[in-house]
Image (tube, rainbow, N blue to C red):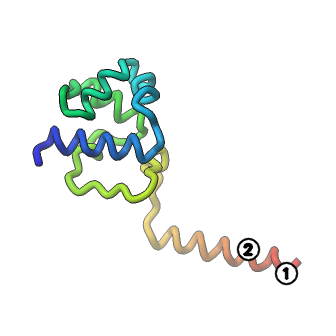
Amino acid sequence: MDARQIYIRNLRKIRRGVGLSQMKLAERCETSTNYIGCIEAGLKFPSIEMIDKIARALHLPVYQFFLENQRLAGRVKPVFARYLLPEAVKQDILNQLEAVARRVKKY
């Protein structure tokens, strides 16, 4: 699979994953719905400027659209992508929240 195909596949998956219509993405990118549809259908390929606009509209770094083995299970939450925490930190936070919840439950 070449870079164009990877980009197109990931764009479609990411857009759908966040529940955004082609029309809404087009509005955010200040372009036409038809153009976004043509990109996703592989009929056109966006300029580097449009690739950047699309990435900003979906709150993701540009490179993420070119990852060949992009895993997008379930709904994607790109707004939070830059705030991902290491697993150990997440587990520590969950443990602390559970401890607080247990203390609150006692009352």
Q: Secondary structure at mark 1?
A: helix
Dot 1: within a 10 Å radius of its alpha carbon, few (fewer than 14), some, or many (20 or more) residues? Answer: few
| Residue 51 drawn at (x, y percent) | 28, 30
Q: Earlier in the sequence, mark 1 or mark 2?
A: 2
Of the pair 42 and 14, the residue shown nearer to us: 42
Establish if 106 lies above or below 37.
below
Horizontally, is 35 left or right of 101 in the view? Answer: left
Q: Position of residue 16 (x, y in %)?
A: 40, 43
Identify the secondary structure beneath mark 2. helix
Q: In the image, which is nearer the foreground, mark 1 or mark 2?
A: 1
- Quarter the C terminus occupies: bottom right
Residue extending farthest to the left is 2
Q: Residue at x 84, y 81 (%)?
A: 106
Q: Which residue is mark 2?
A: 100
Q: Is residue 56 left or right of residue 7?
A: right
- For the point 43% across and 57% down, the residue is 74
Question: Where 102 falls versus 82 (above or below)?
Answer: below
Residue plotted at (23% across, 50% down) = 67
Q: Quadrant of residue 27?
A: top left
For disc 1, the marked residue is: 106
- Asked whether, in this view, residue 28 is left or right of residue 48, the answer is right
Q: Amino acid at mark 1?
A: Lys
Residue 33 picture location, percent across and down: 37, 23
In the rendered image, the vertical position of residue 104 relative to residue 55, given as above or below: below
Distance from disc 1 to disc 2, alpha carbons, whole Å, reads 10 Å
